[in-house]
Image: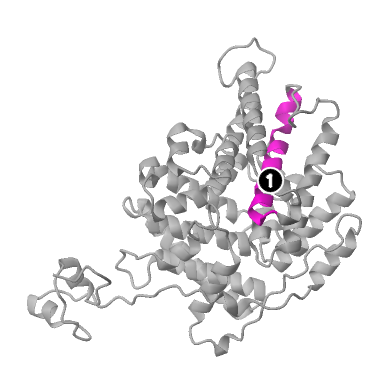
Amino acid sequence: MVNRGGRSKGCGTCRGRRLKCDEGRPHCQRCRKAGLLCRGYALHANFVDETARFRREDVPTQATAQVNTLVPSLVPSLVPSLVPTLVPMSLQPDEDTVLHTHLVARLLPRVSGPASPHILASMINYESTSTAAVPLHKDALRALAAVYFGKVHRDTRIFGAGVRAYVRSLGRLRTAVADPVAVRDVETLASALCLGLVENVALTETTGWLAHYDGLAHLIERRGPAQHVQAGFGRELFRHCRFAIVISALLRRRPCYLAQPAWRAVAQDTSPEGELMDLFAEVPGILHDFGGADRTQAPDATPQSGAGLLRHVEHLLLALSAWRQQLQLPPRASSASHTDLSMLALHHAILLCLAPVCEAFHVSFVAGQALKDAEAARRSVASDICRLAKESFDRSPSSTGAFLFIFPLHVAARHLPPGTDEAVWAETAMQRVIVETHGFEIGRPRTWHLESGRVTGSASPGSDVTTLS
């Protein structure tokens, strides 16, 4: 029998038959004598953290300087250090290792604090059961790593290679989704997540990112709650996909299935991030019901009725207030973590999403404040999002802060009067910091019409208005 203490070096056929392989090259003698097709030998690779290669002394960028000088009253210094480090790729013995190291170091935070696994590192080290020469999720991960590195470092060769890998992986993903077995495979889900992130960076199509978010939501719903209950790679992926699922439901004007009890129990995430995501999942359903509710009818218990919807909104506002009170932040914002700052910004963005519903029911969406001047209240909350983003951008050496603030800043921008210092800062930060410095094309200024399910604005300079409904 094969030694189970570690990785077997035998061929794929012998490992599948649980027999000791003679490791003959190019094909083992045991398979030849048995008249079987030798599937060859797998090459195992381990992720090695080489983050130190990309660290350097802080140097302010031209983009940062331009942002800081636009609104001096609001931003004395926005980002002291966000310059990508150029690595001479011709000198690197293993380009994939460099690209993957850069990807893990710069993109996506851990799902629940510093002790939790990094999803991209987990993806790199995940042992595939596929017989393909390059597993689907590894192909998609390679595309993401190349596109992101090429975008941030303005390396057209690597970026072009990443786009070609993206197109190839997209074709493989379509094939997997059409297969009734492969569509439920965790590797299919992992590849869909990677390709969705590619669209966040490259925006190959104006609304391609939303199509990928829709696809992630469909894949996870089709897999069902039971597939994500046990700890492991599948549940890690589920946790990281929750935000995309809620955004998909929000813009498609439909209730989010993550608000259902069966799905809420899946994540088993009692962290502040997890609890806030559970509350966020209720917002699409409220906005959906608000669009079809008759708010003049007599009170009853129907969720779609005016009275039922009002009770739902009040319950969610109380839960959001309780979450905010339990969030332990240091006295000074400069001491708060990037995760805490981004969570608080998302909390504020959720309140702004609920503002039209609250105003229709004459309910204050800010706990402890009377409903007097709704416009001033919305502007105050939106300004707080800008201040939180500024604090994070001032201290963030990676793209994590920028990635987490994309949605809150988009929501804040639509609640700020045009031409004000805060509005100018928000649009400039999205353009110069999120897009130009950190490479997220999805962060380009646009308007998210949450009431009608549309997104308008430029996906790239000179593009036309885009409608998602």
Residue at 62%, 21% in the rendered image: 311
Scheme of colours in the image:
one colour
- The quarter of the displayed image where residue 149 is located: bottom right
* Tally of numbered tags: 1
Residue at 67%, 43% in the rendered image: 454
Q: Residue furthest front?
A: 331
Q: Nearer the viewer, residue 114 or 105?
A: 114
- The answer to whether 432 is drawn above or below residue 311 in the figure is below
Residue 347 among magenta residues:
yes
- The answer to whether 51 is drawn above or below residue 183 in the figure is below
Label 1 sits on what residue type?
Answer: Leu
Q: Nearer the viewer, residue 67 or 222?
A: 67
Residue 160 among magenta residues:
no
Q: Which residues are magenta?
A: 336-360
Q: Kindly identify which residue carries mark 1.
A: 344
Give the main secondary structure of the magenta stretch.
Answer: helix
Q: What percent of the width, then of the height, locates residue 160?
A: 58, 75
- The answer to whether 340 is drawn above or below residue 82 in the figure is above
Q: What percent of the width, then of the height, locates residue 40?
A: 24, 78
